[in-house]
Image (tube, grey):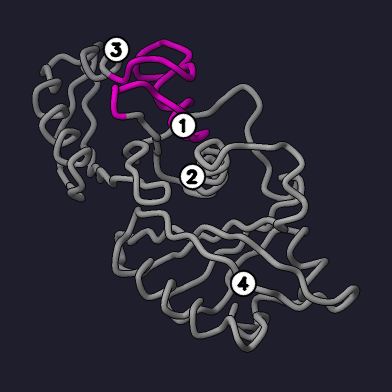
């Protein structure tokens, strides 16, 4: 599930970052202007590996396969991409795969030039920003929750839906249980069981009818994905 912060991310404005979405065949289906202006004028006709320097292609393909096999997990790597204007760029990137209801797979890649990390972010901070950008590209409600149940970020649909259902403006740092408990059919115990499984490394999918105040009832299909940074769990994507 997700929601919106007061200043939502805009893909094309993420400074020095490249955002690319791909299907399971490595074909580019979207990229932001930073990427298209620097590496390819018409990316939707190409595969991502056609833009990578040859000696890095095999490694990228292996990471791509792992990404598809483990939806929701951040896969990290580096590659050299050929810039048509000023030569090769050494890119550090992270990929996350998501399985759609249609069973199609979308892969989201965010990268940055290794010499242009202007903000001095830690690895975890950078991963959170990357995941925020990825989540804001998805129509479904999405949250990223730390292991201690604090909301680290949420996408625009989450903010809008939860404002409507709970009458509260969601904030970073809120305890997700404030919203889970604000239901008529008391789903807290079921939520904690699924969340705990995800914290332990399991991907969980559940379907549940949630009854809200004023006789509102919604059916949700919820996925809980453990998210890792350099092998360490940093939270759960819900």
| C-alpha separation, residue under disc 3 versus residue under disc 4 | 42 Å
The residue under the point 55% across, 61% down is 109
Number of the front mark, 4 or 1:
4
In the orientation shown, which residue stands out farthest toward the right?
Answer: 85
Helix, strand or loop status at disc 2: helix
- Quadrant of the drawing holding the N terminus: top left
Q: Do the residues labelled 2 and 1 touch (CB within 8 Å)?
A: yes
| C-alpha separation, residue under disc 3 versus residue under disc 2 | 22 Å
Above or below for 35 versus 186: below
Q: Where residue 132 sits: x, y (%)?
A: 53, 40
Q: Where residue 233 sits: x, y (%)?
A: 32, 41
Instruction: Decide which of 79, 152 is in the foreground and name it.
Output: 79
Left or right of 202? Residue 125 is right
Number of the front mark, 3 or 4:
4
In the orientation shown, which residue stands out farthest toward the bottom?
Answer: 54
Q: Do the residues labelled 3 and 2 touch (CB within 8 Å)?
A: no
Which image quadrant for residue 42? bottom right
| C-alpha separation, residue under disc 2 versus residue under disc 1 | 8 Å
Marks 3 and 4, the one that precedes in the sequence: 4
Q: Mark 4 points at which residue?
A: 79
Which span of residues is magenta-colored? 147-176
Helix, strand or loop status at disc 4: strand
Helix, strand or loop status at disc 3: helix
**Residue 154 shows which numbered tag?**
1
| C-alpha separation, residue under disc 4 versus residue under disc 1 | 29 Å
Q: Where residue 145 sits: x, y (%)?
A: 36, 30
**Circle count:** 4
Marks 2 and 1, the one that precedes in the sequence: 2
Marks 4 and 2, the one that precedes in the sequence: 4
**Residue 178 shows which numbered tag?**
3
Marks 4 and 1, the one that precedes in the sequence: 4
């Amino acid at each position: 599930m997700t929601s919106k912060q007061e200043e939502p991310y805009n893909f094309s404005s993420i400074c020095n970052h490249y955002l690319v979405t791909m299907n399971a065949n490595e074909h580019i289906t979207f990229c932001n202007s930073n990427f298209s202006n620097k590496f390819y004028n018409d990316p939707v006709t190409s595969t991502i590996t056609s833009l990578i320097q040859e000696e890095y292609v095999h490694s990228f393909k292996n990471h791509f396969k792992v990404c598809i096999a483990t939806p929701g997990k951040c896969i990290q790597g580096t590659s050299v991409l050929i810039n048509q204007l000023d030569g090769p760029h050494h890119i550090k990137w992270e990929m996350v795969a998501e399985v759609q209801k249609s069973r199609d797979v979308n892969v989201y890649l965010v990268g940055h030039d290794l010499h242009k990390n202007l903000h001095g972010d830690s690895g975890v901070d950078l991963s959170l920003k990357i995941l925020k950008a990825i989540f804001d590209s998805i129509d479904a409600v999405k949250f990223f929750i730390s292991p201690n149940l604090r909301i680290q970020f949420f996408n625009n649909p989450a903010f809008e839906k939860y404002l409507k259902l709970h009458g509260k403006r969601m904030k970073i740092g809120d305890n997700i249980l404030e919203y889970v408990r604000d239901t008529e059919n008391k789903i807290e115990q079921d939520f904690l069981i699924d969340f705990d499984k995800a914290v332990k490394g399991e991907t969980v999918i559940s379907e549940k009818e949630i009854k809200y105040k004023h006789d509102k009832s919604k059916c949700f299909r919820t996925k809980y994905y453990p998210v890792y940074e350099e092998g360490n769990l940093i939270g759960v994507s819900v």
